[in-house]
């Protein structure tokens, strides 16, 4: 028997039946996190419940929080981790985290910072040393010029994005988000009391935004357009010509700003190239550029990102940060200076990782192209493959039930194939599932065999 803590409850599972029993005990769908009564009814009145004391406790939450959905990528990763801890040999391909160690010069800079006593608060916006290094990087690599007072360093790019959305959005404003999207974009808009406006894209167009669709959806309430290139979850890269077309549309609407999420810029596969939106004619004044160190430098746990843009907007982000967290880790900032000193685009350390990611991408694309019914848009960057598996929807899986959508298919692959993936519904496209190939080639080879084996009976199953 194994004891496993999940969402606050201890599950006791026989080892021989852990995979199926545990998975079904926790959830029959991938909506792992509990939905409270208040979440189902955002306008619900205050709820009273007995506490451990003699007094009742008002359990009502802010309507703003009730409107926000929990991150499915986090939930699935936690679920898969719980299975592994219970002894189930699950292959985890859900989280977007490089499997490489932080390059040695970066780690050593962090260690030295601790040894040298560099462990105190830093300025809220980040150390001058790091902000100057960021400005140098943006000018040399991205062709955009900033001064240190136009940069704010945060505890990860995620914080930078959230603060930017909060800083520029007013209640009722619209935040335009192409789908598939990173799971947090719409929720950040909702936290700012703004309305996410989702613009679908097509796999046949490599999941790139159609400028005509964008132009048709802009209103007087449109405040922010979020672009991510290379993209999570699709790996798509916006060519410069398409970005220029989008920029011409943005230029027609003085109130519309662009948040350019460039966290995957160095993880890109030739002949694709990265273009910073702020470098386009007339877009410097309209663009908030977000980047960080987690992905390309394998520094996910160091929690460090930054935003650069016009001082008026960036200062507002800094004001929010001064009340949220204050400055980022002093140790991580020293390490980040070392990261930016590795050379153009991260130098040899990053190019070695990118070479490995490309090898893994090529293996997965070739493998899944051999399976009938799967549609693929070949990623040009990042480390994700976004596969259209809707061919299998509507089919009955023996001992499981009907596959109706991306969530049930991912649950099926978790229970039967013991591979943890993320349903496309989390990213705004229910026809697909996301595979992270930030794992070793050996691990990916084993995962593909499990997925193929699990899909074989579905291929011949009747549509119901």
Image (spheres, rainbow, N blue to C red):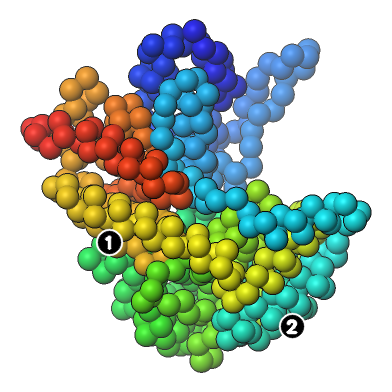
Q: Is residue 7 above or below residue 260?
A: above
**Residue 442's x, y, as percent?**
38, 42
Q: Is residue 123 above or below residue 367?
A: below
Residue at point 49%, 50% (across, down): 96
Q: For mark 1, what is the residue? A: 377
Q: Neighbour class for label 2 at 10 Å: few (<14), some, many (≥20)?
A: some
Numbered mark located on residue 147 in the image: 2
Residue 313, can we see it? no
Q: Is residue 45 above or below residue 117?
A: above
Residue at point 71%, 55% (across, down): 107
Q: CA distance from mark 1 to mark 2?
A: 39 Å
**Residue situated in front as seen by the camera: 91 or 181:** 91
Q: Is residue 278 above or below residue 7?
A: below
> Going by the picture, which residue comes out furthest to the bottom?
281
Residue at point 40%, 69% (across, down): 269
Asked if the residue under mark 2 is in contact with the one under mark 1, i.e. CB atoms within 8 Å, the reply is no
**Residue situated in front as seen by the camera: 128 or 271:** 271
Q: Quadrant of the C terminus?
A: top left
Which quadrant holds residue 237?
bottom left
Element class at badge 2: loop
**Residue 142's x, y, as percent?**
56, 81
């Amino acid at each position: 028997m194994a004891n496993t803590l999940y969402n606050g409850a201890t599950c006791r599972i026989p080892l021989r039946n852990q995979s199926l029993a545990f998975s079904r005990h926790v959830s029959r769908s991938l909506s792992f996190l509990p939905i409270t009564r208040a979440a189902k009814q955002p306008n619900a009145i205050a709820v009273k419940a007995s506490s451990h004391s003699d007094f009742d406790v008002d359990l009502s939450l802010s309507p703003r929080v009730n409107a926000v959905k929990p991150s499915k990528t986090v939930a699935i990763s936690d679920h898969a981790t719980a299975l592994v801890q219970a002894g189930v040999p699950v292959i985890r391909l859900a989280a977007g985290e490089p499997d490489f160690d932080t390059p040695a010069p970066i780690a050593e800079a962090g260690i030295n910072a601790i040894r040298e006593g560099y462990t105190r608060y830093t300025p809220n916006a980040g150390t001058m040393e790091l902000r100057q290094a960021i400005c140098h990087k943006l000018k040399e690599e991205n062709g955009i010029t900033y001064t240190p007072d136009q940069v704010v360093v945060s505890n990860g790019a995620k914080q930078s994005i959230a603060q930017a959305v909060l800083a520029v959005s007013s209640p009722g404003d619209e935040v335009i988000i192409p789908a598939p999207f990173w799971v947090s974009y719409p929720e950040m808009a909702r936290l700012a009391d703004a309305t996410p406006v989702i613009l679908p894209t097509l796999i046949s167009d490599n999941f790139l935004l159609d400028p005509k669709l964008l132009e048709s959806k802009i209103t007087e309430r449109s405040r922010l357009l979020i672009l991510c290139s290379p993209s999570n979850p699709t790996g798509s890269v916006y060519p410069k010509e398409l970005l220029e077309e989008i920029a011409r549309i943005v230029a027609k609407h003085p109130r519309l700003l662009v948040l350019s999420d460039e966290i995957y810029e160095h993880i890109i596969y030739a002949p694709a190239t990265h273009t910073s939106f702020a470098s386009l004619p007339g877009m410097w004044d309209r663009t908030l550029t977000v980047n960080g160190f987690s992905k390309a430098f394998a520094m996910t746990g160091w929690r460090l990102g930054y935003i650069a843009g016009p001082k008026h907007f960036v200062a507002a982000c800094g004001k929010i940060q001064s009340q949220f967290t204050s400055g980022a880790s002093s140790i991580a900032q020293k390490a980040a200076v070392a990261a930016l000193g590795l050379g153009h685009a991260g130098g040899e350390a990053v190019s070695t990782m990118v070479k490995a990611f490309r090898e893994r991408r090529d293996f997965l694309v070739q493998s899944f192209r051999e399976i009938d019914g799967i549609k693929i848009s070949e990623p040009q960057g990042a480390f994700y493959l976004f596969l259209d598996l809707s061919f299998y929807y509507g089919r009955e899986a023996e001992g499981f039930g009907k596959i109706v959508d991306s969530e049930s298919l991912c649950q099926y692959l978790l229970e039967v194939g013991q591979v943890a993936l993320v349903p496309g519904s989390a990213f705004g496209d229910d026809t697909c599932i996301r595979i992270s190939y930030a794992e070793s080639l050996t691990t990916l080879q084993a995962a593909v065999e499990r997925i193929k084996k699990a899909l074989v009976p579905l291929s011949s199953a009747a549509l119901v």
